[in-house]
Image (tube, rainbow, N blue to C red):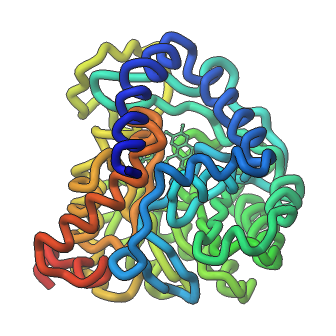
Amino acid sequence: MLRAISSVTRNGYKHVVKPVLFTRHPDDVHRDMIKMARFVGNVPGVRSLPNLWGYESPKYLEQTMAGLVFRNPVGLSAGFDKGIETARIMRAVGFGFMTGGSVTWGQYSGNQGGWFYRLPKSQSIVVNAGLPSEGTKTVAGRAAAYPASLFRDFPLFVSVAKTNSKRCASIAAGIQDYARSLAMFDVELNVGALELNISCPNAFGGEDFTTPGRLEQLLRVVDALALTKPVFIKMPISVPPKQFLALTDTAGAHNITGLTIGNLRKDRENVELKDELPDSVAGNLSGAPNRDISTKLIRETYQRHPGRFVLIGVGGVFTAEHAYEKIRAGANLIGMVTGVIFEGPQVVGEINHGLVALLRRDGLACISDAVGLDAGV
Ligand SMILES: Cc1cc2nc3c(=O)[nH]c(=O)nc-3n(C[C@H](O)[C@H](O)[C@H](O)COP(=O)(O)O)c2cc1C
């Protein structure tokens, strides 16, 4: 029965909803989606309806890591819900965790002009939001207002970035800016984990913390904060491979629980796109063009540091096969944004259902048995 509902939703999304949504500017669609999810999330009864798309199979899908229970491995990655406004709906849709943000200490209205540009044939979105944020105090207050029970087996990660302003362009000021947000979210009981976004490609002053030396400076201060929540780092995927691995070494020497691999793709000139992308459209790529590169980086990280990090595999996940490939490369968890936008909200349940079928096919008892199987470690 639930499979039939999922199939009807898939067809309805593909043939009716998406064609209508895709005639509108993606910034407007995104704003309206957040508004609608917030509204629906506040209406008891109605907010349970998306449960119809979910898929539960605790025996195969549930994992406990870093003191957090994940009812399934598929999470919403950072960027869709910057203000943590949709947590009730994201849980109901069937995600196993969500990452709110990126949030910055200072408020910022984001870049002028369009933030998002669709590349439908390439299954990608060009993102040029520039770290808009309502500021840490407001977003932390919103996270605090949810009932604690919502996050019992659906951990809330908060992605923290440095405020996109001239004031934070120096290394020292940038580090202080991160530290303030981390300290405030760390004491918020509903927050399960913190994610350091060191790799936002659109920030004032560039990607300050994606060299090992500067990451070292940031992580010394993070260590000194003695945070109680597990800390993850959102990794860049467009730095040279040696630099990427050096960053993982730096992270490994500090109090870092996990790595999220990874962020948007910056080297868009190296990507063969199926759509036209005018030079006048600024920004970096999500979705399918990131799939193979993120999987490769997950595999190399797992090979270099087996068991050291909880790895979250992000980039171009649209199907259970894509998710499974990342898990077998070494990811413990999966994150996605673009796949939900292109495929519809039922895709989360479909991926979880498909993952169980793939585990059964391979004679595996649970997700953790599949982690790293293709890494050759
Ligand atoms: C609309 C949009 C906004 C994003 N904003 C953020 C952000 O604020 N912080 C962040 O760390 N990543 C952000 N990302 C990157 C995603 O979290 C993810 O790393 C990337 O899109 C690759 O995953 P995907 O292919 O499933 O979209 C954003 C992505 C999209 C599509």
Q: Residue at x 21, y 28 (%)?
A: 272
- How many tags in the picture? 0
Question: Is any part of residue 241 visible from this angle?
Answer: no
Q: Residue at x 65, y 21 (%)?
A: 28
On screen, residue 182 versus residue 275, left or right, reads right
| Position of 84 relative to 232 (above/below) | above
Depth check, front residue: 55 or 281? 55
Give the image location of residue 257, x and y in percent: 51, 82
Give the image location of residue 166, x and y in percent: 76, 42
Depth check, front residue: 80 or 307? 80
Q: Residue at x 51, y 66 (%)?
A: 96
Question: Is any part of residue 126 visible from this angle?
Answer: yes
Q: Residue at x 81, y 55 (%)?
A: 139
Q: Quadrant of the C terminus?
A: bottom left
On screen, residue 124 versus residue 177, left or right, reads left
On screen, residue 161 versus residue 74, left or right, reads right
On the image, which quarter does residue 369 sit in?
bottom left
Give the image location of residue 167, x and y in percent: 81, 48
Depth check, front residue: 294 or 239? 294
On screen, residue 263 versus residue 158, left or right, reads left
Give the image location of residue 367, x and y in percent: 30, 77
| Position of 307 relative to 87 (above/below) | below
